[in-house]
Image (tube, helix red, strand yellow):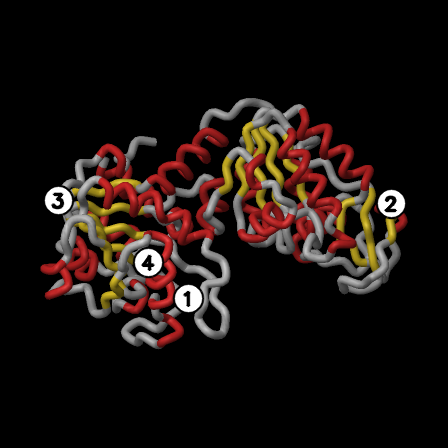
Amino acid sequence: MQFKRLADVDVRGKRVFIRADLNVPQDAAGNVTDDTRIRASLPAIRDALSRGAAVMLTSHLGRPTEGKLTPTDSLAPIAAHLSALLGKPVTLVQDWVDGGAWLAALKPGEVVLLENCRVNVGEKKDSDELARKMARLCDVYVNDAFGTAHRAEATTHGIAKYAPVACAGPLMAAELDALGRALADPARPLVAIVAGSKVSTKLTVLRSLLAKVDTLLVGGGIANTFILAAGGKIGSSLAEVELVGEAKAILADFPGKVPLPIDAVTAKEFKATAQPTLKAIENIEPDDLILDLGPTSVAAVRMILAKAGTIVWNGPVGVFEFDAFAAGTKAVGEAIATSPAFSIAGGGDTLAAIAKFGLAERIGYISTGGGAFLEFLEGKTLPAVAILATRA
């Protein structure tokens, strides 16, 4: 995929508009509790500033009502946190769409944060009028928010149509490079791990992946639905019974590509203090809950991953938040980390597991995208990416 990169654009003396993803968690007092996304946005900001640009930055935060800014929706805490990280003032600008004094005062080497972009009327609907106004604010538009790339909104798509130059920031470019390497021309065997609680949100992803991968490993509630489809027992475990038929069809259409768990760590209740019990799938009782992969299943997964050329990971294989049921996810993560394969991992729960088990430095690439990551895997065209390719 061809797209222009910020690193290749001359920004000296120019106004650079960066769409970042600064949608970070905060505590009741408004303090940022996890600044991973803010830190991920720093390379683009620093690059533009160091090359003499005047930088304007915006992001969404939460789910505000268009036209109504509340203290909860404000980027004020983000501005303060960003200022500390950059070591320079970051002024928060409200009512910024039509420009004004703040724009006239913005000088090269300075950065301002434009208030929550989703407060602007027309943002979510990708308003052409709004996009044209925002494009007039800048000389260069930079999309560095891969996590929102699957949404066609005014700051992710519309503005890129009208800005004099539209390009990808370093975070966006790295995401596309890594995903392209994993899916466009992967080293074989290509192994995908898709796990988590719901199969319904990922069935189309599974079908698309199975047309590309050599092996698809499933876990969590997704695995339970497939176990039912294969005639196995899951007790009272989380599954989507109404989708068993579709799961059967997938198993029939792709024979041998979806190896299923043969043992599991179970409990009688969904609690961190529940007593874990190892059982073969055929011995699962009606009141059992499957909360993790069993060691025999983990050993089989390890063998597959050790021989892989490329690994794509989305979703934990067990309830890793409970230490008694975290061994499976930890073992799978360790197997990915030690495999010679190129690996890419994405999705919020996956990133949380990677952080919990200290695996970040040993995964080939960690995607910041959730929905965008899944839609890319599915083969869908991401609007924010498509417009960058068009402008290139």
SS for callout 1: loop
Determine which of the numbered discs, if any, sits on residue 113 in the image.
none
The residue at the point 73 percent across, 57 percent down is 322
First reached walking from the N terminus: tag 4 or tag 2: 4
First reached walking from the N terminus: tag 2 or tag 3: 3
User: For the C terminus, which image quadrant?
Assistant: top left
Amino acid type indicated by mark 1 = Gly
Task: Give the spatial CA distance, label 4 vs label 2.
Answer: 54 Å
Q: Residues within 10 Å of mark 3 (few under 14, many from 20)?
A: some
Q: Residues within 10 Å of mark 4 (few under 14, many from 20)?
A: some
SS for callout 4: helix
Task: Give the spatial CA distance, label 2 vs label 1.
Answer: 43 Å
Q: Disc 3 marks which residue?
A: 13
Q: Nearer the viewer, mark 1 or mark 3?
A: 3
**Tags 1 and 3 touching, CB below 8 Å:** no
From the top left corner, tell me how far across and down residue 29 is, in percent. Answer: 46, 74
From the top left corner, tell me how far across and down residue 259 is, in percent. Answer: 72, 36
Amino acid type indicated by mark 4 = Ser
From what the image shows, is residue 85 above or below residue 256?
Answer: below
SS for callout 2: strand
From what the image shows, is residue 163 above or below residue 307?
Answer: below
Amino acid type indicated by mark 3 = Gly
Comparing 56 with 210, the one in front is 56
First reached walking from the N terminus: tag 3 or tag 4: 3
Task: Give the spatial CA distance, label 3 vs label 4.
Answer: 22 Å
Q: Disc 2 marks which residue?
A: 280
Q: Disc 1 marks which residue?
A: 62
- Which quadrant of the view contains residue 83? bottom left
First reached walking from the N terminus: tag 1 or tag 3: 3
The residue at the point 45 percent across, 42 percent down is 376
The residue at the point 20 percent across, 36 percent down is 9
